């Protein structure tokens, strides 16, 4: 007779166990297909000097971060102070991949905007944003149409890739980096890679 | 009536109600669950014809066309690997844009076009609808396995 | 400086909450009045400091202090003042602080309105509420500190999500939270009673007004939320079975069951263990709902992954609160057998049946809400459970509830016969069938759903009238009608209005579901469109910029025949800070129908897509909710609940007089 009063408890515990199990399955840690693969090759205009181009091979021999950002991205602003303070510590160069600066912004009518126009406006917007919020990047490159972003499998901004000395992607972080992420995951991984080679 | 048989009737009624409710829930699940397929799965014929399901991905750049009446819209949904043509009549959500994530619900007809009855776009400027992101991720995983 | 002050106040509130959680409980178990007496001042002090923290946060928002992370991501210097203030709760951290504040407010209300209760009982109630507070405030401080600084500060904020910049959103979250959190009082009463092992009629009577008031808030909160969705989302729907809505609807269903079950426990001493379980369930589901919504699990199960600490803390909190309560229940409830016996046909049985049906309905909604999340979390594929599932389950479950709901009040407590009930109600049921079906034919929309809805609505309204008639005849002792009306207690009016509200609600839902009409058209200046006997004349589009958005506003004349009724001005807005487009519908509201217009995109030839909607009887949906809430207010205001308090205070005055 007494057992029936345990039923709600048992049901709830089963439910909680299920929730706990769901929490431990962290899908963000499902390795990206790009992990341990060479960085996709690209050659893009630099934001500070649009006439010069930059590619991943220019960073060979260094451990570096590639951070995908855009001025329209709200979460980028959230992680930006973390990047700025990381840059101040001078641990690792951060390269910014400015992703679809203009066409990614849902609020802009892109009809009749030529590629030259788009590039000029993107540069202006991106530079102003960095001036306003601080520039943590060693340099930024412009992915106007998002092609390079697709090669990197970018599906939400921000995303951050950690790349080793041989030009292989070793870690991918989706979403804004929090100070905890930085301290607990990213920095240890960076140290490890720097020590390794 | 004896208290015992009264109790039996109450318990019996409760059990009958519970069984009926479970049957109701199961049959409603059976009939109304909407499954999700990626464009790659649709292209490979893994999605059923003429049955309601959802497809998610990115709206391909330059694919939005309006028919003469101005109300019927056609566009293409891609997971970067495969492209599915979609046709939809009605108002599009505010955040529906080319190159951005979207999820469509409707039926795949014999003409190979997905006839959407509902178009869902993301909630804010940052992220795609999770289903759309899932599709793109699946596709890039598949691409990796192929190139290996 | 101000955010630091707020942070400090929150820490002090936590300390006081701990005091409130520990000292009175110790006092109650050792029977030490001095320790029990600590509960009230501790709770009031805790409330004070939570309010200070909240005010500090609000000041930072109002002053556009963008060195505060939360203000920088949820406000903007050009945001209108009112949305700067409401922006405080338009995010995870701020809304949890609002939650903590409403909990503190309810606790203070308990300290004020519990003078007539035994001290040991009040001490236990405050102790339980204190533990819930400790859980919430520490969750805020440890994982979701709203006073986090953003250094270096940004020049401009990202603005509040434009969807939330709406009058409905000013009152919806506070109402909803007052409702959610209000169930904590019924919960604390139940736990306190379990601790002492005394779950009697007195306990039920004390719990009833608190539960009812919380239910009123929740009802109003849900109604306002649905009204917001109706005019802000721009396509005229009023309920979407969206997980966020379900998260508030599930506690409502269980809370409704609890309210009725408490009535039986008070009057007849029956269902005691079931009532306790419902009290625990209503609050647990309110907790679960808060977390489902606030943690972002619903938009993506993977939201936790960015910050697993939050997820674990939430889970731990749920397990402690619910787990401990259920252990206590399993330990104490077996002693609760007995209570008044009742026959198969009695008011008790009808209430029991409805209780079980409401609980089953709540469980089925919960299942439909969580099932896709579970599958996704386990990587077993992605599915979605849409409105068709909920309607398929909900309509058959609620139909008997609505029928029984009007039978119950005609039944006697303890036992009643089948034939007298049938004799009283068969004519009403027959009339309802005829009127409902007849109306369906009259509006020329004979689907089983329309017929069912109209029959049920007619049944509720007719039986309500019959009930009122009976009640007045019972009081034939009094000569005049007005005297007889006045003799009816407030609680009875509450029941009557609440049930009638359901009838009005069903009329609205049924008619808008059957008879609404929609038309998407492209329109140019001077063009005309027709829908459901109304004409719409498109007069053009002008710029109409607001403080923090740019907008295009269309002017559309609404005509009935040749007579102009009004001018509708739907807008397409672009909120500057987030670059987010928004549709602002324009509605001509009427008692029998709404005409709803929203502006779509501009096409290349300069014409605009316009969506026209005709929504008959839609405002009856909210009128029904209003009646239900009003019923709750009447029920809670019944003199019975105040009588003991007055007794006590006159006794105290008398005692004081003697002492002097």
Image (tube, helix red, strand yellow):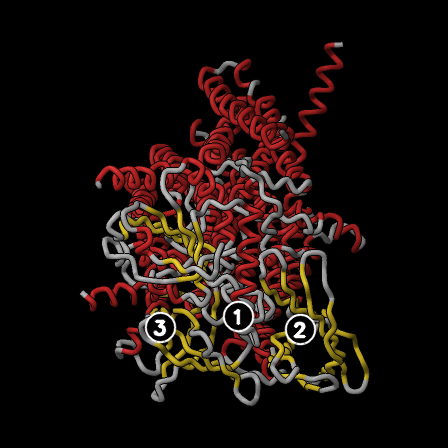
The residue under the point 39% across, 43% down is C307
The answer to the question of whether label 1 and label 2 lie on touching residues, with beta carbons closer than 8 A, is no
Q: Which type of secondary structure does the marked residue at label 1 adopt? A: helix
Q: Residue C182, can we see it?
A: no
Label 2 is found on which chain of the structure? C
CA neighbours of label 2 inside 10 A, class few (<14), some (14 to 19), many (20+): many
Asked which secondary structure carries label 3, the reply is helix
Q: Residue at x 38, y 76 (%)?
A: B52
Q: Name the residue tied to disc 2.
A: C596
Rounded to the nearest angstrom, the CA distance separating label 2 from label 3 is 32 Å
User: Who's the residue at 45% across and 57% down the image?
Assistant: A46
| Left or right: C1, with B104 as reference point | right
Left or right of C331 on screen, residue C157: right
Q: Are marks 2 and 3 in contact (CB under 8 Å)?
A: no
Disc nearest the viewer among 1 and 2: 1
Asked if residue C364 shows in the view, the reply is yes
In the displayed structure, C607 sits above or below A16; it is below
Which quadrant is home to the N terminus of chain C? Answer: top right
The percent position of residue C60, horizontal first and vertical second, equals 64, 38
Residue at label 3? B31
Q: Are marks 2 and 3 on the same chain?
A: no
Percent from the top left, x then y, of residue C367? 38, 57
């Amino acid at each position: 007779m007494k057992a029936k009063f345990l039923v709600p408890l048992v049901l709830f515990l089963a439910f909680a166990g299920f929730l706990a199990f769901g929490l431990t399955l962290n899908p963000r840690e499902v390795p990206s297909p790009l992990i341990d693969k060479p960085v996709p090759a690209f050659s893009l205009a630099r934001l500070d000097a649009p006439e010069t181009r930059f590619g991943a091979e220019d960073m060979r021999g260094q451990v570096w971060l590639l951070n995908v950002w855009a001025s329209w991205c709200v979460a980028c602003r959230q992680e930006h102070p973390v990047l700025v303070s990381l840059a101040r510590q001078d641990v690792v160069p951060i390269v910014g991949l400015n992703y679809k600066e203009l066409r990614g912004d849902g609020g802009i009518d892109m009809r009749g905007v030529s590629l030259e126009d788009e590039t000029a406006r993107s540069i202006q917007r991106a530079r102003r944003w960095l001036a306003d919020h601080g520039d943590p990047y060693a340099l930024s490159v412009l992915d106007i149409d998002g092609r390079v972003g697709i090669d990197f499998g970018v599906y939400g901004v921000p995303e951050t890739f950690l790349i080793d000395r041989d030009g292989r992607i070793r870690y991918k972080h989706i979403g804004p980096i929090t100070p905890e992420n930085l301290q607990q995951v990213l920095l240890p991984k960076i140290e490890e890679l720097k020590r390794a080679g | 009536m004896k208290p015992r048989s009264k109790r039996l009737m109450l318990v019996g009624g409760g059990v009958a109600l519970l069984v009926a409710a479970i049957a109701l829930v199961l049959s409603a699940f059976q009939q109304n669950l909407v499954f999700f397929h990626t464009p790659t799965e649709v292209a490979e014929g893994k999605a059923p014809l003429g049955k309601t399901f959802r497809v998610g991905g990115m709206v391909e750049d330059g694919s939005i066309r309006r028919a003469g009446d101005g109300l019927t819209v056609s566009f293409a949904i891609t997971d970067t690997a495969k492209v599915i043509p979609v046709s939809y009549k009605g108002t599009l959500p505010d955040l529906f844009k080319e190159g951005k994530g979207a999820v469509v619900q409707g039926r795949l007809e014999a003409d190979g076009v997905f006839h959407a009855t509902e178009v869902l776009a993301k909630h804010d400027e940052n992220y795609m609808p999770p289903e759309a992101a899932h599709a793109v991720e699946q596709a890039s995983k598949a691409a990796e396995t192929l190139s290996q | 400086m101000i955010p630091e002050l707020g942070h400090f106040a929150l820490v002090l509130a936590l300390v006081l909450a701990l005091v409130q959680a520990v000292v009175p409980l110790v006092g109650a178990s050792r029977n030490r009045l001095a320790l029990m007496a600590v509960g009230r001042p501790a709770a009031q002090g805790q409330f004070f400091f939570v309010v200070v923290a909240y005010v500090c946060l609000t000041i930072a928002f109002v002053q556009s202090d963008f060195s505060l992370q939360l203000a920088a991501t949820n406000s903007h210097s050009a945001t209108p003042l009112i949305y700067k203030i409401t922006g405080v709760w338009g995010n995870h951290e701020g809304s949890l602080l609002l939650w903590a504040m409403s909990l503190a407010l309810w606790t203070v209300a308990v300290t004020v309105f519990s003078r007539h209760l035994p001290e040991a009982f009040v001490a236990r109630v405050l102790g339980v509420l204190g533990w819930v507070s400790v859980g919430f405030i520490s969750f805020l401080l440890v994982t979701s500190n709203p006073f986090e600084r953003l250094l270096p500060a940004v020049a401009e904020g990202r603005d509040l999500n434009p969807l939330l910049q709406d009058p409905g959103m000013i009152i919806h979250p506070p109402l909803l939270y007052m409702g959610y959190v209000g169930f904590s009082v019924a919960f604390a009463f139940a736990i306190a009673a379990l601790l002492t092992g005394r779950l009697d009629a007195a306990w039920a009577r004390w719990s009833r007004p608190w539960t009812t008031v919380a239910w009123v808030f929740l009802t109003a909160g849900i109604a306002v939320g649905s009204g917001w969705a109706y005019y802000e989302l721009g396509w005229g729907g009023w309920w979407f079975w969206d997980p966020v809505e379900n998260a508030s609807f599930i506690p409502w269903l269980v809370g409704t069951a609890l309210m009725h079950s408490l009535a039986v426990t008070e009057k007849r001493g029956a269902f005691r263990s079931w009532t306790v379980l419902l009290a625990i369930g209503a609050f647990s589901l309110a907790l679960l709902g808060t977390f489902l919504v606030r943690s972002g699990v619903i938009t993506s199960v993977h939201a936790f992954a960015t910050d697993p600490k939050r997820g674990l803390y939430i889970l731990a909190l749920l397990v402690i609160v619910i787990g401990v309560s259920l252990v206590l229940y399993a330990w104490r409830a077996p002693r609760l057998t007995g209570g008044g016996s009742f026959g198969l046909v009695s008011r008790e049985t009808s209430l029991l049946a409805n209780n079980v049906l409401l609980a089953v309905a709540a469980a089925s909604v919960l299942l439909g809400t969580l099932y896709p999340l579970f599958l996704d979390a386990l990587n077993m594929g992605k599915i979605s459970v849409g409105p068709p599932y909920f309607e398929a389950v909900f309509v058959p479950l609620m139909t008997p509830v609505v029928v029984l709901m009007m039978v119950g009040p005609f039944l006697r407590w303890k036992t009643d016969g089948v034939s007298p009930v049938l004799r009283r109600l068969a004519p009403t049921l027959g009339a309802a069938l005829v009127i409902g079906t007849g109306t369906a034919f009259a509006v020329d929309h004979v689907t089983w759903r329309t017929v069912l809805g109209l029959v049920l609505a007619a049944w509720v309204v007719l039986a309500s009238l019959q009930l009122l008639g009976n009640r007045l005849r019972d009081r034939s002792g009094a000569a005049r009608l007005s005297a007889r009306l006045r003799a009816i207690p407030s609680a009875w009016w509450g029941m009557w209005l609440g049930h009638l509200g359901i009838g009005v609600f069903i009329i609205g839902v049924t008619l808008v579901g059957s008879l609404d009409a929609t038309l998407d058209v492209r329109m140019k200046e001077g063009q005309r469109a027709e829908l459901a006997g109304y004409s719409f004349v498109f007069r053009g589009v002008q710029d109409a910029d607001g403080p923090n958005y740019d907008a295009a506003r269309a002017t559309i004349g609404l005509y009935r025949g040749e007579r102009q009724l009004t001018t509708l001005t739907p807008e397409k807005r672009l909120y500057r800070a987030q670059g987010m487009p928004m549709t602002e519908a324009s509605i001509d509201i009427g008692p029998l129908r709404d005409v709803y217009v929203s502006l779509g995109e501009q096409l290349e030839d300069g014409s605009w897509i316009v969506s026209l909607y005709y929504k008959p009887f839609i405002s009856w949906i909210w009128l029904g909710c209003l009646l239900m809430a009003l019923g709750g207010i009447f029920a809670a205001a019944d003199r019975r609940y105040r009588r003991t308090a007055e007794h006590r205070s006159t006794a105290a005055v008398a005692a004081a007089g003697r002492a002097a």
